[in-house]
Image (cartoon, rainbow, N blue to C red):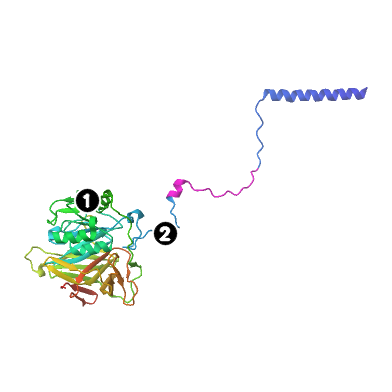
Amino acid sequence: MDVQKKRLAGLLAAAILMLTILSACANNPEEPPPVSLPEPVVEQANEAPSAAEEANTPDEETPAVLNPLTGLAVQDPQILDRRPVMVKVSNFPRNGRPHAGLSFADIVFDYYIGFGTNRFLALYYGQDTPEIWPLRSGRRVDAQLSTMYSGVLGYGSADADTDAVLAGALGNYAISYLEAECPVFCGEETHDAIGVYANSAEITRFVDAQGWENGKPDLHGMEFSEAPQDGTQKADQVTILFNAYNRAEWRFDNASGKYLRWIEHVPDEYAEPLEWEMVPLVDKVTGDQLAFSNVVVIFAPYTELAPSAHEIAIWGNKNGLPAYLFRDGGMTAGEWVTANDSDPMQFINPNGTPMAFKPGNTWIAIMGLSSSFRETQPGNWETFFFLP
């Protein structure tokens, strides 16, 4: 009996305890806080970058696209997917100075046109400029040079014979200012030295708009190296004279590592040479003095057809003619050759290896075979033009 009482008392106590717990839960509906447990240690894999991060991260495996005419990387590789634009620029009369846009050119060809004067053919490939000025007439040699560099020639006008030569060699790619309106060529009276300017990018757009082939050409032939040539001679300055009153000086500048252009300033047309002074030649577009990484003096045969008309034999030079490369304050003698009529000039050292140009722009002066070339004092070189 006592055992049964104790069992009933235990059951009753258990029942009371259970009712107490249930009553407490009913009066406090909130669940107890979860127990904090240590999280497992897991190695996190590197997350894939977002599209924005990929756009801002340079691809180190993608090589730079180099301009074959300067050896420099271009900011926009698509600019090389076209023919070079080659534009005629006047140097005389002097009221057309300072010129515009020459500092943007990859190469400038500089040659004699008669009466002691010269003219420039500026080649634009790796970059453009909105103003190339003053635009002047074409010459026969432009047909050869433009063909060799697969160029589009932009010029003011030309006499009937020269126009026939240009059209025969270049076809549609010989474009005078009479054939393309502004913004390609802007201004009037191309025989006025300050009349017309050209826009290199607009010349490219004009060719594209006509539906003419305008793909990337093969412009091999030039070699570039940061290291100077072996066996160079000191060259602080090179002076180019197409006449006693037509003087160009390229003075080496240690700070920039380039040759800076100086040109004669004549107070009036009757002034004697002793009254002249040399002044910096600036680019109207930038306001800065012209600076070129390379200056080259080459010799080629001229044939005078008239006082202001000449044939210059650039094509057919397979055996080589003298060439002098100025870079980094030094001069190297070698040769230039034209392997064929449709490839750029090549420049060769005496040992048969390619001349190493400094990466950057190049100025090429084309002198007659009888022109002089000498060192006037240590480090100062001079060439004076003579026919043929």
Residue position marked by numbered label 1 in the rendering: 184
Q: Residues within 10 Å of mark 1 (few under 14, many from 20)?
A: many
Q: Quadrant of residue 355?
A: bottom left
Residue position marked by numbered label 2 in the rendering: 63
x, y percentage for residue 229? 33, 73
x, y percentage for residue 138? 18, 60
Q: Main secondary structure of the magenta part?
A: loop
Q: Quadrant of the N terminus?
A: top right
Residue at the (89%, 22%) spot, across then down:
5
SS at badge 2 = loop
Q: Quadrant of residue 134?
A: bottom left
Frontmost residue, 230 versus 10: 230
Frontmost residue, 105 versus 140: 140
Residue contact between numbered discs 1 and 2, judged by CB atoms under 8 Å: no
Res 286 visible: no
Amino acid of disc 2: Pro
Frontmost residue, 354 versus 7: 354
Count of numbered circles on the image = 2
Residue at the (42%, 59%) spot, across then down:
63
x, y percentage for residue 315? 24, 68
Q: Earlier in the sequence, mark 1 or mark 2?
A: 2
Amino acid of disc 1: Val
Q: Which residues are magenta?
A: 38-55
Res 246 visible: yes
Q: Does 37 appear in magenta? A: no
Q: Quadrant of residue 109?
A: bottom left
